[in-house]
Amino acid sequence: RQRHEALRAELAGAVREAASRVAADVAIVVPPLPPAVLPHEVLAFDGELPFVAAPLARLQLRLNGVALLAVCGPNGCGKSTLLQVLAGRLAPRAGRVERNVRQAWLDQRLAGFDGPGSALERIQDACRQRPEAELRTRLAQLGLGAATLATPCDALSGGERLKLALALALLADEP
Protein backbone atom coordinates (compact mmCIF):
# COMPACT_ATOMS: atom_id res chain seq x y z
CA ARG A 1 0.00 0.00 0.00
CA GLN A 2 2.86 2.38 0.86
CA ARG A 3 4.62 1.55 -2.41
CA HIS A 4 1.36 2.15 -4.27
CA GLU A 5 0.86 5.54 -2.58
CA ALA A 6 4.50 6.53 -3.26
CA LEU A 7 4.18 5.56 -6.93
CA ARG A 8 0.90 7.42 -7.19
CA ALA A 9 2.45 10.59 -5.68
CA GLU A 10 5.46 10.29 -8.00
CA LEU A 11 3.22 9.95 -11.07
CA ALA A 12 1.04 12.87 -9.97
CA GLY A 13 4.19 15.00 -9.65
CA ALA A 14 5.31 13.95 -13.14
CA VAL A 15 1.92 14.90 -14.55
CA ARG A 16 2.04 18.33 -12.84
CA GLU A 17 5.55 18.95 -14.20
CA ALA A 18 4.53 17.93 -17.74
CA ALA A 19 1.44 20.14 -17.56
CA SER A 20 3.57 23.14 -16.58
CA ARG A 21 5.70 22.67 -19.72
CA VAL A 22 2.74 22.61 -22.10
CA ALA A 23 2.33 25.90 -23.96
CA ALA A 24 -0.96 27.63 -23.37
CA ASP A 25 -3.30 27.85 -26.35
CA VAL A 26 -3.16 31.15 -28.17
CA ALA A 27 -6.58 32.71 -28.50
CA ILE A 28 -7.62 33.46 -32.07
CA VAL A 29 -9.35 36.80 -32.51
CA VAL A 30 -11.39 37.34 -35.66
CA PRO A 31 -11.49 41.06 -36.43
CA PRO A 32 -14.96 42.59 -36.44
CA LEU A 33 -16.29 43.23 -39.90
CA PRO A 34 -17.92 46.54 -40.78
CA PRO A 35 -21.69 46.39 -40.59
CA ALA A 36 -23.14 45.40 -43.94
CA VAL A 37 -26.33 46.57 -45.51
CA LEU A 38 -27.49 43.55 -47.42
CA PRO A 39 -29.73 43.71 -50.45
CA HIS A 40 -33.03 41.87 -50.20
CA GLU A 41 -31.83 39.15 -52.56
CA VAL A 42 -28.23 38.22 -51.79
CA LEU A 43 -27.86 35.38 -54.29
CA ALA A 44 -29.98 33.71 -56.93
CA PHE A 45 -29.28 30.65 -59.06
CA ASP A 46 -31.60 29.17 -61.61
CA GLY A 47 -29.82 26.72 -63.82
CA GLU A 48 -27.96 23.53 -64.30
CA LEU A 49 -24.72 22.53 -62.61
CA PRO A 50 -21.79 21.27 -64.70
CA PHE A 51 -20.38 17.79 -64.05
CA VAL A 52 -23.47 16.76 -62.04
CA ALA A 53 -25.90 14.09 -63.20
CA ALA A 54 -29.67 14.54 -63.30
CA PRO A 55 -31.80 15.03 -61.27
CA LEU A 56 -29.35 16.87 -58.99
CA ALA A 57 -27.96 19.04 -61.80
CA ARG A 58 -31.07 21.24 -62.18
CA LEU A 59 -31.47 23.68 -59.31
CA GLN A 60 -33.25 26.85 -58.23
CA LEU A 61 -31.89 28.68 -55.21
CA ARG A 62 -32.50 32.11 -53.68
CA LEU A 63 -30.86 33.50 -50.55
CA ASN A 64 -32.37 36.59 -48.99
CA GLY A 65 -30.80 38.82 -46.34
CA VAL A 66 -28.76 37.11 -43.66
CA ALA A 67 -29.19 33.39 -44.23
CA LEU A 68 -27.40 30.22 -43.27
CA LEU A 69 -27.33 27.41 -45.78
CA ALA A 70 -26.13 23.87 -45.14
CA VAL A 71 -25.09 21.91 -48.23
CA CYS A 72 -25.21 18.22 -47.33
CA GLY A 73 -24.93 15.01 -49.29
CA PRO A 74 -22.74 12.04 -50.09
CA ASN A 75 -19.34 12.33 -51.76
CA GLY A 76 -19.57 13.10 -55.46
CA CYS A 77 -23.12 14.48 -55.48
CA GLY A 78 -22.06 18.02 -56.49
CA LYS A 79 -21.73 20.00 -53.25
CA SER A 80 -18.37 21.56 -54.16
CA THR A 81 -19.50 22.15 -57.74
CA LEU A 82 -22.57 24.02 -56.49
CA LEU A 83 -20.46 26.22 -54.22
CA GLN A 84 -17.96 26.92 -57.01
CA VAL A 85 -20.79 27.96 -59.36
CA LEU A 86 -22.32 30.19 -56.69
CA ALA A 87 -18.91 31.80 -56.05
CA GLY A 88 -18.27 32.40 -59.75
CA ARG A 89 -15.34 29.99 -59.97
CA LEU A 90 -17.25 27.73 -62.39
CA ALA A 91 -19.85 28.63 -64.99
CA PRO A 92 -23.20 26.86 -64.86
CA ARG A 93 -23.93 24.43 -67.69
CA ALA A 94 -27.11 26.42 -68.30
CA GLY A 95 -28.99 29.20 -66.55
CA ARG A 96 -27.93 32.22 -64.55
CA VAL A 97 -26.29 33.19 -61.26
CA GLU A 98 -26.85 36.60 -59.68
CA ARG A 99 -24.56 37.68 -56.85
CA ASN A 100 -25.49 40.92 -55.09
CA VAL A 101 -22.79 40.88 -52.40
CA ARG A 102 -19.01 40.54 -52.29
CA GLN A 103 -17.86 37.06 -51.42
CA ALA A 104 -14.74 35.12 -50.59
CA TRP A 105 -13.74 31.62 -51.60
CA LEU A 106 -11.91 29.52 -49.04
CA ASP A 107 -10.58 26.53 -50.98
CA GLN A 108 -10.75 23.31 -48.96
CA ARG A 109 -7.38 22.24 -50.40
CA LEU A 110 -5.78 25.67 -49.80
CA ALA A 111 -4.18 25.33 -53.23
CA GLY A 112 -3.28 29.01 -53.57
CA PHE A 113 -0.59 28.84 -50.91
CA ASP A 114 2.27 27.11 -52.62
CA GLY A 115 5.37 28.80 -53.97
CA PRO A 116 8.28 30.67 -52.49
CA GLY A 117 6.54 33.91 -51.38
CA SER A 118 6.24 34.53 -47.65
CA ALA A 119 2.95 34.65 -45.81
CA LEU A 120 3.40 38.39 -45.21
CA GLU A 121 4.13 39.05 -48.90
CA ARG A 122 1.02 37.10 -49.90
CA ILE A 123 -1.23 39.07 -47.58
CA GLN A 124 0.37 42.42 -48.47
CA ASP A 125 -0.35 41.75 -52.15
CA ALA A 126 -4.05 41.27 -51.35
CA CYS A 127 -4.33 44.07 -48.76
CA ARG A 128 -2.68 47.08 -50.42
CA GLN A 129 -4.97 49.55 -48.62
CA ARG A 130 -3.87 48.47 -45.12
CA PRO A 131 -0.56 49.45 -43.49
CA GLU A 132 1.88 46.66 -42.63
CA ALA A 133 1.56 47.30 -38.88
CA GLU A 134 -2.20 46.72 -39.02
CA LEU A 135 -1.72 43.54 -41.08
CA ARG A 136 0.83 42.20 -38.60
CA THR A 137 -1.55 42.92 -35.71
CA ARG A 138 -4.51 41.24 -37.43
CA LEU A 139 -2.40 38.22 -38.37
CA ALA A 140 -1.08 37.92 -34.81
CA GLN A 141 -4.69 37.93 -33.59
CA LEU A 142 -5.29 34.94 -35.87
CA GLY A 143 -2.28 33.15 -34.36
CA LEU A 144 0.24 33.94 -37.10
CA GLY A 145 3.33 35.38 -35.39
CA ALA A 146 6.35 37.16 -36.86
CA ALA A 147 8.30 33.93 -37.48
CA THR A 148 5.37 32.43 -39.38
CA LEU A 149 4.95 35.57 -41.51
CA ALA A 150 8.55 35.30 -42.74
CA THR A 151 8.12 31.63 -43.69
CA PRO A 152 7.56 30.74 -47.37
CA CYS A 153 3.94 29.72 -47.95
CA ASP A 154 4.89 26.27 -49.20
CA ALA A 155 6.59 25.57 -45.84
CA LEU A 156 3.56 26.50 -43.70
CA SER A 157 1.62 23.82 -41.86
CA GLY A 158 -1.96 23.06 -42.84
CA GLY A 159 -3.29 25.03 -39.88
CA GLU A 160 -1.10 28.04 -40.69
CA ARG A 161 -2.27 27.95 -44.32
CA LEU A 162 -5.87 27.83 -43.16
CA LYS A 163 -5.34 30.86 -40.90
CA LEU A 164 -3.68 32.72 -43.78
CA ALA A 165 -6.58 31.85 -46.08
CA LEU A 166 -9.04 33.07 -43.45
CA ALA A 167 -7.07 36.32 -43.11
CA LEU A 168 -7.20 36.82 -46.88
CA ALA A 169 -10.95 36.18 -46.93
CA LEU A 170 -11.52 38.67 -44.08
CA LEU A 171 -8.96 41.39 -44.81
CA ALA A 172 -8.25 41.49 -48.55
CA ASP A 173 -9.24 44.54 -50.56
CA GLU A 174 -11.17 42.12 -52.80
CA PRO A 175 -12.03 38.88 -50.98
Image: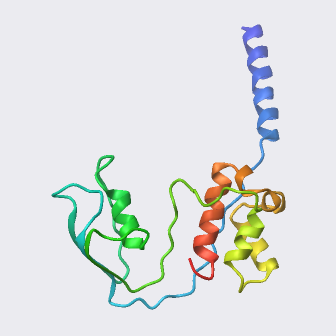
Instruction: Report the quarter where the C terminus lies.
Output: bottom right
Left or right placement of residue 123 versus residue 67 in this view: right
Q: Indicate whether 70 appears above or below 45.
A: above
Total count of labels: 0
- Name the quadrant containing residue 123: bottom right
Front residue of this view, candidates 156 and 144:
156
Q: Residue at x 35, y 71 (%)?
A: 91
x then y, percent, for residue 69: 34, 67
What is the image's colouring?
A: rainbow
- Name the quadrant containing residue 67: bottom left
x then y, percent, for residue 63: 30, 78
Instruction: Report the quarter where the N terminus lies.
Output: top right
Front residue of this view, candidates 140 and 11:
140
Q: Is residue 140 visible?
A: no
Q: Residue at x 76, y 22 (%)?
A: 11
x then y, percent, for residue 75: 33, 46
Q: Indicate whether 103 appears above or below 79.
A: below
- Name the quadrant containing residue 147: bottom right
x then y, percent, for residue 148: 78, 57
Q: Residue at x 79, y 33 (%)?
A: 18
Q: Residue at x 40, y 66 (%)?
A: 84
Left or right placement of residue 16 versus residue 45 in this view: right
Q: Indicate whether 26 appears above or below 35.
A: above
Q: Is residue 40 visible?
A: yes
Front residue of this view, candidates 83 and 17:
83
Front residue of this view, candidates 48 and 174:
48
Left or right placement of residue 4 versus residue 51 in this view: right
**Which residue extends farthest left?**
55
